[in-house]
Amino acid sequence: MLTWTLPPALAARARAGALPHGWILAGAGEPELEEAARTLAAAFLCQDPDRRPCGTCKHCRKVEKGVHPDLQWVEKYPDKRQLVVEQIRALRSDAYIRPNEAERKVYILQNAQQMNDEAQNAFLKVLEEGPEYAVFLLLSENHLALLPTIRSRCELLRLTGAEAGGDSLRLGGELAGLLLGGDRWRLLAWCVPWEKAGREDVVALWKAARETLLTCRDPASLPRAVRLAQTLGELLSLAQGSGNLGVLWGRLYAAQE
Ligand SMILES: [Zn+2]
């Protein structure tokens, strides 16, 4: 069963065949993003003109069973830390082979923020110049880390429907947790994609992390939370000026120790 349903406005656009071919799905955890992507993919592949996805045509059923030949899930190789350019090149060649059964071909990129710069640039080309029938759904718990050029060419679908800034609040909470947790490698792995993010996004993230730290109620963590919040406050005022963000990230990592 397709467990997620398109919001009404989106469903109307799907019926009208008026959905753009580039999407970023964000604002939720991986399982929710995957469920939403499955439904949105079915909306592109479904053959019922009155209700897309109908849930009953052969395309919808194949999507549900995970056997639709025109739907591909792309994720990083298990032995790699990032989605590499070879995968995007393979996707590009595949995109030029016409669909097997449906009228569209859908690619779902899981953890799209794991594309390294080279992969993101290659992807941007496919997004701009790929064949008309190709559709790309980028799933990301950290979509602000995608290149602005990619973000500006995709429609953002936020699953939580949270108020503006809801995303940075949630992500700020995650960052605060990692800073408090003291596991350096987890912190670095989480932050790496953010090192490419723009100043405004970083400022919003750090503000949210600082707010979370200031609401810490655990007496054992409190002194550490206060110290980290203080450091974030200093880094924020530098980031809001013209402080070098790379240097500021380094100072934040050092503050965790
Ligand atoms: Zn259908």
Image (cartoon, rainbow, N blue to C red):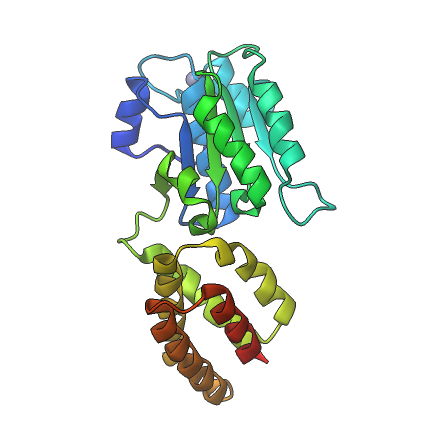
Going 67% across and 33% down the picture, which residue do you hit?
86
Quadrant position of residue 188 = bottom right
| Position above or below: 148 against 61 | below
Judge by depth and name the residue closer to the eye, 232 or 136: 232
Residue 217 visible to an observer of this rendering: no
| Count of residue discs | 0
Residue 166 visible to an observer of this rendering: yes
Quadrant position of residue 132 = top left
The residue most toward the right is 79
Quadrant position of residue 73 = top right
Judge by depth and name the residue closer to the eye, 248 or 49: 248
The C terminus lies in which quarter of the figure?
bottom right
| Position above or below: 194 against 45 | below
Going 33% across and 12% down the picture, which residue do you hit?
49
Q: Position of residue 79 (x, y in %)?
A: 74, 46
Q: Quadrant of ligand 1?
A: top left
Q: Position of residue 81 (x, y in %)?
A: 67, 50
Q: Position of residue 151 (x, y in %)?
A: 40, 41
Going 39% across and 79% down the picture, which residue do you hit?
234
Q: In the image, is 89 to the left or to the right of 234?
A: right
Q: In the image, is 51 to the left or to the right of 118?
A: left
| Position above or below: 245 against 251 | above
